[in-house]
Image (spheres, rainbow, N blue to C red):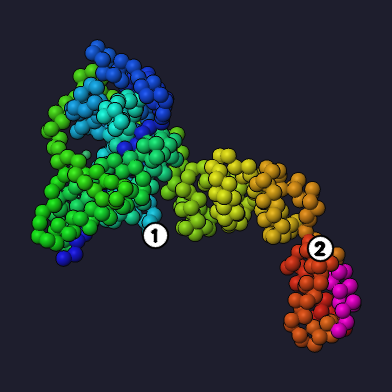
Amino acid sequence: MEFETVIGLEVHVQLSTKSKIFCNASAAYGGEPNEYIDPVTLGLPGALPVGNKKVVEYAIMMGLATHCEIRRFNRFARKHYFYPDLPKGYQISQFDEPICERGHVDFYMDGTKRTVGLKRIHMEEDAGKNLHDSRTSSSLVDLNRAGVPLLEVVSEPEIHSPAEAAAYLKAVRQLVRYLGISDGNMEEGSLRCDANISLRPVGELKFGTRTEIKNLNSFKFVERALEYEIARQSAILKAGNKVVQETLLFDSENGSTRPMRSKEESADYRYFPDPDLPPVVVEESWVQEVKGRLPRLPAEWATELVNEYGLSLYDATVLTTERAFVEFYHQVVASCGNAKAACNWVTSEFFGALNKAGLELENSPVKATDLGELIKLVENDTISGKMAKSVFEEMFATGKAPGVIVEEKGLKQLSNDDEILTIVRKEFDSNPTQLAGYLGGNERLHGFFVGQVMKSTGGSANPKKVNDLIRQEAAARKGA
Ligand code: ADP
Ligand code: MG
């Protein structure tokens, strides 16, 4: 029997606000254990939460970027559970009134456009971290992360392969980074994901029983965990047995999943509106104001690069991976006026050099305007494409402007027709035997004369002009 894979992701995005969601303690990553705590974080009796406006604003930004409806009257709810990483005994989250609903995320995979629907995006607080010390057989609690703001982005079950799940997750990460609301750093846990997966016979409309794999913190793990679950669930179904609905953990060491707990129902959490927090009312004017400040998003950039700059979809996708990339590219184009040449230089030479040096774009020794200048020097025949590559290396190593390097190294390309023609004539005259052969139709001797001219100009002559002028002079001599 053939099965169809059905996947829905719940992505947790840690927001990069200065302070926590309901108090003034720092929301920074790292720090000494329990450095960023206060009475609210600790859930001390009498300590009252106060909402962080930035969190609501970031939620609105994400909602707008994913085409969601923004709820105007929001409430926070208490989600109860008992665990030492959460001293209050409940997490403040949103339940049946999430701030964003019914949106979608669009992205490209293997050159085709995909759309995954969003059920909801809600705001909530993160929990602390338990550290288990095997030497002393004790557990320690670090509450720095407790109360750090999160957005939970919940997709519809509309993803159909592990690769598509990873591509969707990349698209979510790309969006939050463009918006500047999170660094999306998966290693530091700023982006984590729970993956729900079920199988159903091809053609069946009803969903199969799902399992949920918790806390996946890399694109690779998402794919590997889902691959494993597909194999595990299909073996169960093929044997005529039933998949048990449960929550699983992925063990990255041996690439398998194992049960963590049986699936809890929402009733188990005893959700109710948090009486300590007033409702959050989102005025239309606020939404409009945020909309006006939204940066250009990757899909919009990519469309422009394809339609107006004439780039391939592949190049547009590469250039829009990060907002910093496409902004850099845009500056290069503004400075040289050639979109295709700028694309070639940025995606090959420039990204290659950054990669090799292990540098982020923001630390690039080469400025966008200088790269644009370099491209112009090639376009107006001042230097050859080959020279440009060595000038670029020098720019990358020293941060100098291309004009300065060309000047210093005396790299100017010889492009003056009269000067080149003089050299061509000299070479013709001093190689009469080869000239007779060439004029007699021996094409190989064309290459000989190109080589001679290049040699006598120390490689500085514009090769295209040398070619053309040799032909022109040969034709003139034949005619004479
Ligand atoms: P819960 O309230 O139990 O968390 P939700 O309906 O909010 O369930 O869904 C949680 C996630 O699980 C969503 O991303 C959703 O797309 C996904 N999901 C729901 N049903 C299935 C299913 N049968 N197979 C795969 N994913 C599913
Ligand atoms: Mg859930």
Disc 1 residue: CB within 8 Å of ligand 1 = no
Task: Decide whether the magenta segment is chiefly helix, strand or loop.
Answer: helix
Q: Quadrant of the C terminus?
A: bottom right
- x then y, percent, for residue 391: 70, 52
Q: Residue at x 15, y 31 (%)?
A: 269
Question: Which residue sits furthest bottom?
Answer: 440
- Between label 1 and label 2, give the one nearer the viewer: 2
Among the two numbered marks 1 and 2 on one chain, the one whose residue lies closer to the N terminus: 1
Q: Amino acid at mark 1?
A: Asp
Q: Quadrant of residue 233?
A: bottom left
- x then y, percent, for residue 442: 76, 85
* Residue underneath mark 1: 110
Classify mark 2: helix, strand or loop.
loop
Classify mark 1: helix, strand or loop.
loop
Q: CA distance from mark 1 to mark 2?
A: 46 Å
Residue 327 visible, this angle: no
Q: Is residue 353 left or right of residue 8?
A: right
Q: Residue at x 41, y 29 (%)?
A: 29
